């Protein structure tokens, strides 16, 4: 597996969680799994083992001499290799010094990572059956496999590319192309061309033997103009080789029965601890201590994808109206767009039933999951999403836009019977969001027995990485069977 992120070493979003968890799950099924990521400045050499000798990586203009370090993923037998090249990776951040500005040489940084994967395999005398690339930073791996590396040791190796978020494609000026070491014929032939720029993800989609994304619904959505970000036609063309496999949850980390971050543990059969967590959450955020009022939690990056305009928009935002007109409380953790951070601060001052903390704190995120009654995820699109699955295990009913992995993991409330595990809406508008929160609050006050039934059902849902890993194993077998009949 080749990735720009892998927890606990490097993480900027859900990609790092998914890559490491899948690697461990595959290893536990008996597969020989190894990871390659960059050694960023934040990853100290202390505790890492250096592989003997330098490793040359041929790129377009020269051979780049690198070092490689190794370690094991915690609590596993999965080796992680760290590509050490100070000029590219010896700096702050993963993609940029801040979330708002990426490094202009990212195409070269991650092209080096992709090509280095082949050199590392040679150095280890270990030739894999599958090279599994994750998102645009490693999407040159299937391109190299089908061009410069399609010979000798790798003639029987197949490639899989996982799309964790199609909204990020690695689009850059074509002046970077010569660094890749590919003939200009590949600019069109391997699918790089995108409005006279290079599109790294597009080239990977064209070259990979098989494609996956992180939920079945998202696999269908990205083949439509509304969710395809300009690549829907290509993905429809490759639809026979594209599958959606829902991410799993690491229940060793996200489990209210053993969670060390919360003041009281609890289970579906012993729920008293959830009330303790709710009180602790109210205290932590400075909300009135009221066990009888419904508490809505949110932990999110404050970006357009997460529905911040609909929640906190500078015109009509659903959350200010909710706080003004409904008997509830809101506890928010988030950081991102400056206007939204400022709005959260303003709302915290205006409404006694709304409190927000800017930034991210892992322990506090666990408390929000445990202490809230409802969890808000009104994403414009959500390839998989993990927080809604965490919420289900913690008996915190999700309020979600019916899209992507949210649609695949949450079952809508049936008012007549009390069936379901959350509350869903189809059209992402402030009014629809306002109404759906109102629906959940109505059920809280008028159908308490339904809330209890939904919590029980939610907490017994299992989203296992073992199941996901078995589906990936089937995909790997399919990729190998396809051989070299790839689309170019």
Image (cartoon, rainbow, N blue to C red):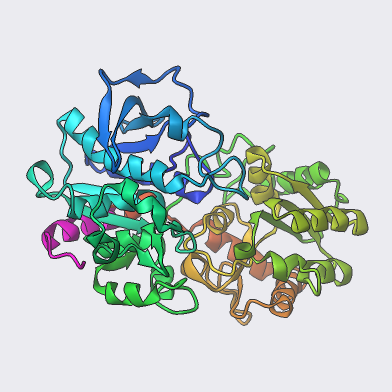
What x and y, as percent, mark residue 219?
38, 69
Q: Position of residue 469 (x, y in %)?
A: 31, 51
Quarter of the image where one finds residue 52 = top left
Side of 128 relative to 84 (left or right): left
Q: Main secondary structure of the magenta part?
A: helix
* 110 within the magenta span: no
Q: At 63% across and 44% down in the image, what residue appears?
A: 366
Query: Dividing the picture into quarters, in which one does residue 54 lie?
Result: top left
Report the front residue among 413 and 240: 240
380 in relation to 332, above or below: below
Can you say which quadrant of the picture contains the C terminus? bottom left
Q: Is residue 263 left or right of residue 487?
A: right
Above or below, 304 against 462 in this view is: below
Give yes or no for residue 481 being in the magenta stretch.
yes
Q: Residue at x 56, y 42 (%)?
A: 257
Q: Residue furthest left?
A: 152
Q: Magenta region: which residues? A: 470-488
Residue located at (88% from left, 69% from top): 324
């Amino acid at each position: 597996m080749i990735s720009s992120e892998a927890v606990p070493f490097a993480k900027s979003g859900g990609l790092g969680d998914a890559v490491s968890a899948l690697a461990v799950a595959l290893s536990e099924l008996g597969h020989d799994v190894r990871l390659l990521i960059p050694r960023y400045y934040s990853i100290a050499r202390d505790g890492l083992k250096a592989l003997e000798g330098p490793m040359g990586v041929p790129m377009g203009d020269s051979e780049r001499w690198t070092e490689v370090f190794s370690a094991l993923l915690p609590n596993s037998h999965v080796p992680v290799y760290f590509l050490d090249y100070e000029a590219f990776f010896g700096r702050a951040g993963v993609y940029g010094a801040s979330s708002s500005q990426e490094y202009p040489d990212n195409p070269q940084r991650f092209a080096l990572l992709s090509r280095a994967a082949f050199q590392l395999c040679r150095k280890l005398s270990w030739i894999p059956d599958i090279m599994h690339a994750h998102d645009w930073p490693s999407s040159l791996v299937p391109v190299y496999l089908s061009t410069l590396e399609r010979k000798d040791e790798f003639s029987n190796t197949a490639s899989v590319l996982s799309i964790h978020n199609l909204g990020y494609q690695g689009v850059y000026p074509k002046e970077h192309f010569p660094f890749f070491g590919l003939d200009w014929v590949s600019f069109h032939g391997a699918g790089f061309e995108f409005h006279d720029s290079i599109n790294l993800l597009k080239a990977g989609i064209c070259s990979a033997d098989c494609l996956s994304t992180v939920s079945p619904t998202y696999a269908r959505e990205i083949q439509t103009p509304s969710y395809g970000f300009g690549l829907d036609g290509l993905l429809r063309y490759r639809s026979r080789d594209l599958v959606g496999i829902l991410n799993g949850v690491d229940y060793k980390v996200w489990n209210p029965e053993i969670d060390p971050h919360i003041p009281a543990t609890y289970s579906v059969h012993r729920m008293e601890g959830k009330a303790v967590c709710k009180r602790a959450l109210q205290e932590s955020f400075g909300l009135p201590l009221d066990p009888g009022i419904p508490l809505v939690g949110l932990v999110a990056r404050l970006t357009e994808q997460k529905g911040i305009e609909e929640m906190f928009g500078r015109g009509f935002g659903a959350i200010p109206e909710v706080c003004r007109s409904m008997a509830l409380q809101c506890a928010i953790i988030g950081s991102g767009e400056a206007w939204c951070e400022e709005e959260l601060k303003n709302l915290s001052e205006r409404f006694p039933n709304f409190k927000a903390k800017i930034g991210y704190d892992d322990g506090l995120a666990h408390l929000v999951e445990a202490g809230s009654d409802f969890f808000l995820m009104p994403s414009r699109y959500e390839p998989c999403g993990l927080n809604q699955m965490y919420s289900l295990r913690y008996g915190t009913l999700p309020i979600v836009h019916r899209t992507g992995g949210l649609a695949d993991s949450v079952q809508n409330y049936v008012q007549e019977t009390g069936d379901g595990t959350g509350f869903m809406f189809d059209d992402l508008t402030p009014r629809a969001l306002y109404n759906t929160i109102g629906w959940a609050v109505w059920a809280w006050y008028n159908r308490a027995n339904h809330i209890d039934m939904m919590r029980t059902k939610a907490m017994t849902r299992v989203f296992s990485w073992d199941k996901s890993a078995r589906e990936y194993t089937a995909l790997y077998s399919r990729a190998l069977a396809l051989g070299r009949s790839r689309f170019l």
